[in-house]
Every structure is written in C-alpha cells, then in structure tokens.
Image: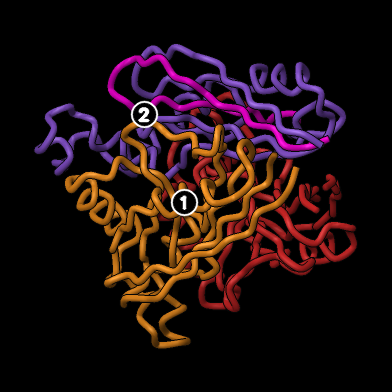
Chain colours: A red, B orange, C purple
Amino acid sequence: MGVHADVFGIRTKGENDILDITGNVADVVARSDLKDGIACVFVSGSTGAITTVEYEPGLLEDLPDALERLVPKGLTYQHHLRWHDGNGHSHVRASILGPGITLPFQNGQPVLGTWQQIVFIEMDVRGRDRQIHVQLVGE
Amino acid sequence: MGVHADVFGIRTKGENDILDITGNVADVVARSDLKDGIACVFVSGSTGAITTVEYEPGLLEDLPDALERLVPKGLTYQHHLRWHDGNGHSHVRASILGPGITLPFQNGQPVLGTWQQIVFIEMDVRGRDRQIHVQLVGE
Amino acid sequence: MGVHADVFGIRTKGENDILDITGNVADVVARSDLKDGIACVFVSGSTGAITTVEYEPGLLEDLPDALERLVPKGLTYQHHLRWHDGNGHSHVRASILGPGITLPFQNGQPVLGTWQQIVFIEMDVRGRDRQIHVQLVGE
C-alpha cells in the first residue's frame, strides 16, 4: 500500500475550453508503483471544473451551451461588482460542477467506459495555466 | 491496509429511472475485509449519474422534473445532430451531476444519514445494463 | 499507511448559509498522523452540500441567487405534497451539488488554490446542526 502524488500542467485557450485529460491521468497511474486503488483528480483553483463526458465535437458545444443557459454570463454578479474581473458566472459554474472527480483504477489503468473521458472545463473568461493534481492511494 | 475492488450490475427501465443502490454498496463493504476507509462508487459510462437523495416517491418525481427544466430534452443538441441517438441532454445531465460519489465507511458500514440513500440515475433515453464499481481503500 | 476518521459539528443559520470549513478540514489533517493521501469530506444528510468556492461576500450572494434560478423555491414539489416540510427544492439542490468532495492532502495540508475554500451550503429551510465527516486515507 502507498500514496503516489503527481501533478501535471495544462494550458487552456479561454472560456469553455474543454480538455481531455484522460491520457494524463492514465500516465500518472501507469508511472506509479500502484496497480489498484482510488485516484483523486483535482484542480487547485476556483474557476475550473473536472467531470467526465463522451469527448466528441457535438458535446463540446452542447455542454457550454447548457452552462450558458444554467448560469448566464450576462447577468449581474455581486462578485463582479466587487472585483471587476467579469467572471462571477465562472465561479458559480465551477462550484456547481465541482473541482474534481475520484475514480477507481485497476491493473494500472483508470476504470472508465469506452466513451467516457475525464475532462477539465475552463470556466474562467481567459486562457489559464492550470495545475491538475492526481493523488493515488492503493497497492 | 488494503484495496477491495468490486462491481455489481443493475438494469434500469429507462430515462429517469432512479435506483437505490445503498444496499449494494453496503454489501460490498460488509463482504470485504476492510472496516474503515473510503468507498468510491463509480459508473463506467457517460449517460448515468450517482448522487445521494432521500429515497421517497415525491423526490423520484421532483428530481427528473428539475433535470428537465435545467437541461430540456426538446432542445437541439449538436450531439444528436452528429450521432442521431436522441440523448444529447442525457450526456449533459450526466456530466453536470457526475459519474460517482466517494464516501467514508466505518465499522464495516457506509456513513450516511438516516434519510440519505445512494442512487444511480439513468439519464439515457432507454433502459440499460449498468456496471457500478465500488472501490474500497482502508483497513 | 493508515485511516484517520474524524467528524466535526457546525451550526447553520438557515437556508443558503454558506460556511467556510477549510480550517476545520485542515485541522483534521494536521491532527492526524498522516502526511500525504486523500481526504473525503462528507455530510451525512440529504439537504446540505459541500463544494469549493472563493469565499468572498459577492459569491455568497451569487451562489444562492443561482440556486434559486436553477431550482426555484416557489414551484410545487411532490416531496412537499407528501411530507409538508417545504424543502423539496432543498433536496433537489443538494442532490445536484452533491454531499461531499474528495481532495488530496500533502505534507499535512489540504491541496487547494489560494482563493479556493471548502464550503458547506445549507440547503434546508431552517438552521441545522450538521455533522461533517472527514475521512483520511494515506501515509
């Protein structure tokens, strides 16, 4: 039994950029000495989110469209009135989707469906350098 | 310390079928040699979600009603225009709720409130056979 | 390697009370013998949620405003028609946001961004005494 802590960096292009980070997570698991356990994939930051999705071009449009309907960019946000950074909606969206996911890994590989990828969604209004932590606990 | 990996199958009846899987998860914990730790409950697939809810008939209507208001089935989804499977809204709903939850277990039992059950929500437009993974790490 | 199980109590003032519990979680990690691993922060109860947010006054208004738009209090909920407790929307909101988050800890501290705090959001219509479980697995 052991813990394996790793982190990788990604650069996003701007709001609603959705990056497939499945390969990055799989690499961390493969590089570790652990075969079976739990992987926690987590972004340190309050304007990004991590979830799973079938990574295909249609949903890369549908998901941002839904986020815009759910938490519209054009409303007045108190966060913006205080800080003038135009990203109140980004914070709200990120809090609702959540900063990370936890998933099993077995035989040195993340457990995922064939059409299920781990994604980072940039909620902020500009491109950002993001640090994604992958923490493994297992044997 | 150790890892216990298990999986169980469920059959859903169709869209918005909400199944109480608390007993299945509790069985996995009870069958394992582990008494205390963390349980990761995860669906491999991109059109289902796992969360907790008070499992009573009212909320089994309220939750699908809310999902329909939040991510309506009748809108045009790019996913559907590409793949013609009519489940663009299913994918979006699943990504927002998330594919799994992680919870503590103590003394061989999941830690939950009295009126808090672990549920699988079928987001897809037809009944499906689902594999729910339960990965335990603990001692 | 080991497991550290802890719990702390908080008292909420009522609906949409958002409490910063980062310090509580950090204290649990610091008090344990574990330096690196995964922390599962989980509320046992079906009308509260845990996520991360930049804890500043603007977002403490924006997040409840968004929840009200997403899952309005004034609609008719089947849960209310059955149980007459006026909190159907609370249950739905809690299920969508989720009952817990899981995050890494390293060198005896939770891994978080500078402007990223762990919060408990009271979704119920009255103040409640809440038990927040923090379960650590690591070394």
Task: Residue type at mark 1: give it.
Answer: Asp
User: Viewer-proximal residue, A49 or A133?
Assistant: A133
C130 magenta-colored: yes
- Please give the residue where the numbered disc 2 appears in the rendered image: C123
Q: What element does badge 1 sit on? A: helix
Return the residue found at the far left. Answer: C81
Left or right of B67, for residue B65? left
Q: Residue at x 90, y 62 (%)?
A: A31
Relative height, residue B117 to residue A28 (above, below): above
User: On what subunit does the disc labeled 1 rest?
Assistant: B
Q: Do labels 2 and 1 share a chain?
A: no
Q: Percent position (x, y) of residue B107?
A: 55, 33
Label the magenta part by its dominant secondary structure: strand
Identify the residue under disc 1: B27
Q: What stretch is highlighted in magenta?
A: C114-139
Q: Measuring from the top left, give residue B29's x and y in whole percent.
A: 54, 47
- Residue B75 versus residue B53 in the image, above or below: below
Question: x and y percent of residue B25 in the render?
Answer: 47, 51
Measure the alpha-carbon separation of dots 2 and 1: 30 Å
Q: Nearer the viewer, mark 2 or mark 1?
A: 1
